Image (cartoon, rainbow, N blue to C red):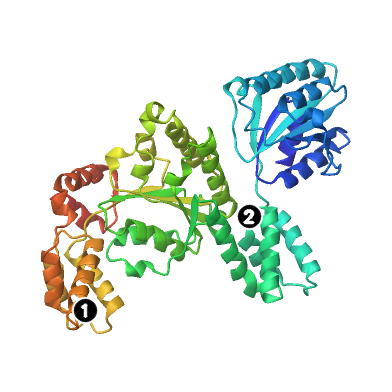
Amino acid sequence: MQEEINVLIQAQYPLIYLVTPEEERAERAIAMIAQRKSQQQRVFVWTVTHGIVEYGQSRHTTQHNTVSPEAAVQWVIQQKEPGIYIFKDLHPFIDAPATTRWLRDAMASFREEAKKSLKKSIIVMSPVQQIPIELEKEVVVLDFPLPNLKELNQVLSHQLDQSKTRRTTTETREKLLKAALGLTRDEAEKVYRKAYVKAGRLTEAEVDIVLSEKKQIIRRNGILDYIEEDETLDSIGGLEELKRWLKQRSNAFTERAREYGLPQPKGMLILGVPGCGKSLIAKTTSRLWGLPLLRLDMGRVYDGSMVGRSEANLRNALKTAESISPAILFIDELDKSFAGSSGSSDSDGGTSSRIFGSFLTWMQEKTSPVFVMATANRVERLPGEFLRKGRFDEIFFVDLPNTQERQQIFEIHLKKRRGDIDRFDIEQLAKVSEGFSGAEIEQAMVAAMYEAFAQDREFTQLDIIAAIKSTQPLSRTMTEQVAALRDWARQRARPAASSLAEYQRMEF
């Protein structure tokens, strides 16, 4: 990124928009660029609290006549020497007509001065991308990346020196560094200090402390959730074809797979009837593959408080996912997240359409090992762009469990609750629960247990059958919707159960 900024400055790009929450780290990078022999430019920093101050001067220095953004841009235009001018948090003012006009005047002035070899560049630095339409053709937008392993190694080395910890092994250092991936430099410093304060050392045993704090930081952004799941694939009944596909790719993100010539998996879409284990499959895959699972809550992405805020939320979430990759990015109920994107210009000023377009572009162009795992119930609500080949490696359809799969589901849930299940006739339970999803079977069992618990006795086969017969499953209350979903999936999706049995069932 530092080289990219250097190239733009040398190429005399007048306006650069740097999206980052790490002001100090970005400032240092720009100052290093300005000090190169090929540049030799002074760096000035503007804030609404202190006006324009030369980089390196005391933070308490204030130039009152340049506190307003309009006066600051005017001051920049009047300078007669090369310079790089950093404007921090200009986004609340950039839409003001006067500010926009002064910036356009500055661009025109810089172009004239560039003919006389006078290089000037304005760098707008903000955690939020907000660009007026008048400046869209003038500005270059860059996302300043989070620290890589090399930078985090510097932070860790400094903390080890400060704590006078003896030399760590290469393996321990690597684990401590990877545990901090996805954090800003400041966050990494605080996490390492916390781990040292709690344990009095920094060794492999403290990796869990770093990870737990990292999870809290990720959760604080309100958009990504760090999901931990204790269940394994064995806790899911049926879906053998889907399980086999996942097990085949359990080592897909290793160097051995790259050396073999395999591409990194992009993602998968799981369609199906509600309550049939789609979300649980996504969560257990994280444990199978040994990768962190981040859930992207699209409802939290949308923020109407400020223009451009929603798009910034999505970019930040995707950047965080990429920074800790390889990882799994889980989006539950994708059909609800992007259902209204095609007509959003009438309802939300086009925000949904822009979010949808940004996400599609990211999926198509991403090179980082982030595996997108999405689930959906209503395929007719999904935009067609999601379903074309290339977006996902595979589209799986999860149908209602057949008799054999229902037997497995009953066995799994009974073994969770009781050690001895021989007293239950599982074949009979599977027959009477025809048309039930896995979630409905579990809830029927819970209802049977409550009935017996209220009578202060052990629950029985008859309790479960009674609970099943008193329940109307979705397959009966929403027959038309289930039939339509099966009809769509027959030709367009891969069955999650064994192929032949699944297609025969879908032909009902």
Look at 79% across and 15% down and name the residue there: 112
Report which residue position mark 2 lands on: 183
Q: Amino acid at mark 2?
A: Leu
Look at 42% across and 31% down and name the residue there: 348
Q: x%, y% of residue 316?
A: 56, 45
Do we see residue 12 in this rendering?
A: no
Report which residue position mark 1 lands on: 453
Is 366 on the left or on the right of 244, as rendered? right
Disc 2/disc 1 C-alpha distance (Å): 48 Å
Q: x%, y% of residue 291?
A: 50, 61
Look at 77% across and 73% down and name the residue there: 165
**Quadrant of the drawing holding the N terminus:** top right
Q: Amino acid at mark 1?
A: Phe
Q: x%, y% of residue 120?
A: 80, 26
Please name which of the two marks, 2 or 1, marks the residue nearer to the observer.
1
Is 485 on the left or on the right of 130, as rendered? left
- Disc tally is 2
